[in-house]
Image (cartoon, helix red, strand yellow):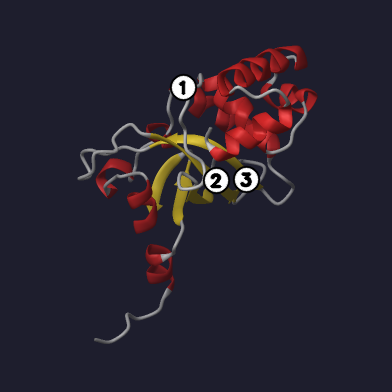
């Protein structure tokens, strides 16, 4: 059996990480790893909004706003967030399952962040399991705490007061049984 021809299309399609090309937050193309990660078929994603991969429409909206506000001068952005598998229509029983995902990429034109982009997705579920039920806002704040942001920075990023962030942090601590913020982050990272 001969090796497949190596070209850009083959490299994209067989890359060991999920890849997406987007325009106006619509999936223009994606690779096999992304389809596997989200338990989806090409028909379920191509030409569709990224919204289908989020737990709620509000999380999709807020993430889009956060991306615009946080792009670096080269148009790059990265974070960890909770996303949603599509399944079972793709031949799996994981439909609707929520999981932690690392997303990184870049807007091709930083002045128009959603016009066109290249995005990489890494499934973190083998290292970080979602055992507890969190609200959409709790998931956002948990992800930013994991990134090491303070209440003040989280508040600024989410356009809420630092005091509101502290209230959500307290809820997360109660739900996880954490006594301190470092313990909370540890528990979030371990899924516990």
Q: Which mark is residue 133?
A: 1
Residue at image point 68% right, 31% down? 183
Instruction: Give the secondary structure at mark 1.
Output: loop
- What is the CA distance from the residue labelled 1 to the residue labelled 3? 24 Å
Is residue 31 at least partly visible in the picture? Answer: no
| Nearer to us in this view, 181 or 73 | 181
Q: Earlier in the sequence, mark 1 or mark 2?
A: 2
Q: Mark 3, mark 2: which one is toward the viewer?
A: 2
Relative to 168, say whether 64 is above or below: below
Between residues 144 and 74, which one lies in front from this camera angle? Answer: 144
Q: Are marks 3 and 2 in contact (CB under 8 Å)?
A: yes
Q: Is residue 68 left or right of residue 180?
A: left
Rendering quarter of residue 39: top left
Decide if residue 101 is on the left or right side of residue 187.
left
Circle 1 or circle 3, nearest the eye: 1
Instruction: Say above or below: 56 vs 118.
Output: above
Which residue occupies the foreground of this view, 142 or 188? 188
Q: Residues within 10 Å of mark 2 (few under 14, many from 20)?
A: some
Tell me residue 19's x, y (percent): 45, 55
């Amino acid at each position: 059996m001969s090796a497949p021809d190596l070209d850009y299309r083959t490299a994209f399609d067989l890359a060991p990480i999920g890849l997406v090309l987007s325009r106006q937050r619509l999936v223009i193309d994606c690779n096999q790893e992304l389809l596997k990660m989200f338990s989806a078929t090409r028909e379920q994603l191509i030409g569709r909004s990224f919204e289908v991969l989020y737990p709620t429409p509000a999380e999709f909206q807020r993430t889009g706003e956060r991306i615009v506000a946080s792009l670096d001068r080269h148009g790059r952005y990265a974070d960890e967030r909770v996303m949603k598998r599509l399944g079972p229509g793709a031949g799996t029983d994981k439909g609707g399952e929520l999981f932690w995902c690392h997303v990184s990429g870049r807007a091709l034109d930083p002045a128009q962040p959603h016009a066109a982009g290249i995005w990489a997705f890494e499934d973190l579920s083998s290292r970080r399991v979602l055992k507890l039920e969190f609200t959409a806002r709790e998931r956002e704040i948990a992800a930013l705490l994991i990134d090491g942001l303070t209440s003040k920075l989280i508040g600024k990023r989410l356009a809420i007061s630092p005091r509101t962030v502290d209230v959500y942090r307290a809820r997360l601590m109660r739900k996880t049984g954490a006594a301190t913020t470092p313990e909370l982050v540890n528990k979030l990272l371990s899924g516990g």
